Image: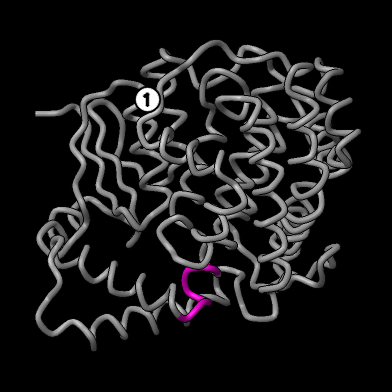
Amino acid sequence: MPAYRLFGAETSPYSLKVRAFLRYKGVDFEWVTRSRETETDFRALARLATVPLLVSPDRPVSQESTRMLFALEASHPEPSATPDDAALAALSLILEDFGDEWLNKCMFQQRWGNTPDRDQAGLRALVQLSGGKRPRAWKAPSVQITERMADRLPLVGAAQENWPVLDASWRRFALNLNAHLKEHLFLFGGRPTFADFSIAAQFQQMLLDPTPAEWLKDRAPFIVAWCEHMDDPKAGGPFAALADLGSTLAPLFSEDVAKTYLPWAKANAEAIRKSSGQVSVTLDDGTFGQSAQKHAAEAFAAVGRQVSRTLKDSTALGDFLGAAGCLNFFQRAEATADAS
C-alpha cells in the first residue's frame, strides 16, 4: 500500500499543487478522487469539508496545502524545492502566497463569474462527484452546483464589483510571467519552488475554462507549456542566481504583487487584528472589498516572519523588494519580529 493517500479533485488547484509536489518528490502515493463513492472515507478523516486531504505515514492528517509542502520537503529533501539562497527562498514564499490567496480569487471569478465557463464547470464538478460519469439526470444538479458556487463569489472576494480589478490583475501578471518563463524553465531557474506549484495550479484551472484558456493559449504560450510540465515536473538544473533572474522576475513583483496582493494582504491582516468584518483597499485598478479572511491573514503573517528573518542578513532581498515597491509591506512584520 502506498505510504501516502491524497484525497483531491481535478477541479481543485490546491489538490493539483500537492499532487504535483508528491510526483516531483518521487513519493509513492494513492490519488483518491473525492466523489460519492469515496465520501465516507473522506469524512472519516476530514476536519474541513474541502480538499486536498493528505494521509501521511508519520504525520497527522493535513488539509492545508502549504503545510503539506513543508512537511514533504522536510521528509523528502531531494530533489529540493527550496533554494539555498535565502533571498530566493523568501521570494518564493511571497509568490506562493500570492498564488494561493490572490490568484485564486482571479481563477474563481473567471470560472464562476462567466456564463459559459460556469456552465461547463458545474457539469465537470458533477461528473467528478459521480465517479467520472455523467448521470442521466444531469441538468438540474449541474445547475444547482453552478448556482451554489456563484453564490460563493463574494465570500472568496470575487463579487461583481471586484471583477475589473481581478481581471486586470491576472492578465497583467500572466503577460509578465510568460515573458519570464520564456527565459527560464521555472520561476527560480532549473527546478521548481513552492511558488511554481502554487501559481501553476491556478493557471492549470484557468486552462480548463474556455474564456481564460483561449486568452492564455493566444497570449501566454510559455505559461501553457509550463503548466503542462508542472503536472509532473522534473528538475532540469540548479536554481539560478537572483542577479540572473532579476530582469524578468522583478516585474512580477513590481507590476502586480506590490500593487494587488500585498496591499490587500496587509489590509486584510489589519482588519483581522482589529476584529473588523470587512476589508476595503484602494488599488491602482480600483477599490477592492470583501469580508476579512482569517486564514489569509495567518498565511501572510507566516510569510512576513520568514521575510523579516531573511531581511536581517540579506541585503539582496532588501534591495530587490525595495526596488519592486514591496519592502514597506514587510516593515511592520520586521519591526514585530525585532520586538519579539
Horizontal side of 216 relative to 248 (left or right) equals left
Name the residue located 53 percent from the left edge and 32 percent from the top edge. Answer: 194
Q: Is residue 63 above or below residue 268?
A: above
Name the residue located 47 percent from the left edge and 69 percent from the top edge. Answer: 111
Q: Is residue 52 above or below residue 320?
A: below
- Seen as rendered, the residue at the extreme bottom is 140
Q: Is residue 101 above or below residue 27?
A: below
Q: Which SS type dominates the magenta stretch?
A: helix
Q: Is residue 120 above or below residue 254?
A: below
**Which is nearer the eye, 150 or 281?**
150
Where, quadrant-wise, is the C terminus in this rendering? top right
Q: Position of residue 127 (x, y in %)?
A: 20, 67
**What's drawn in magenta, residue-wise?**
110-115
Q: What's the residue type where badge 1 is placed?
A: Tyr
Count of picture labels: 1
Name the residue located 15 percent from the left edge and 71 percent from the top edge. Answer: 134
Q: Quadrant of residue 333?
A: top right
Q: Quadrant of residue 291?
A: bottom right
Where, quadrant-wise, is the N terminus in this rendering? top left
Q: Which residue is mark 1?
A: 24
In the image, residue 113 lies in the stretch drawn in magenta: yes
Q: Position of residue 188 (x, y in %)?
A: 63, 24
Q: Position of residue 199 (x, y in %)?
A: 55, 43
Q: Position of residue 25 (x, y in %)?
A: 35, 22
In the image, residue 162 lies in the stretch drawn in magenta: no
Q: Quadrant of residue 271?
A: bottom right
Horizontal side of 64 relative to 108 (left or right) equals left
**Which is nearer the eye, 309 or 290?**
290
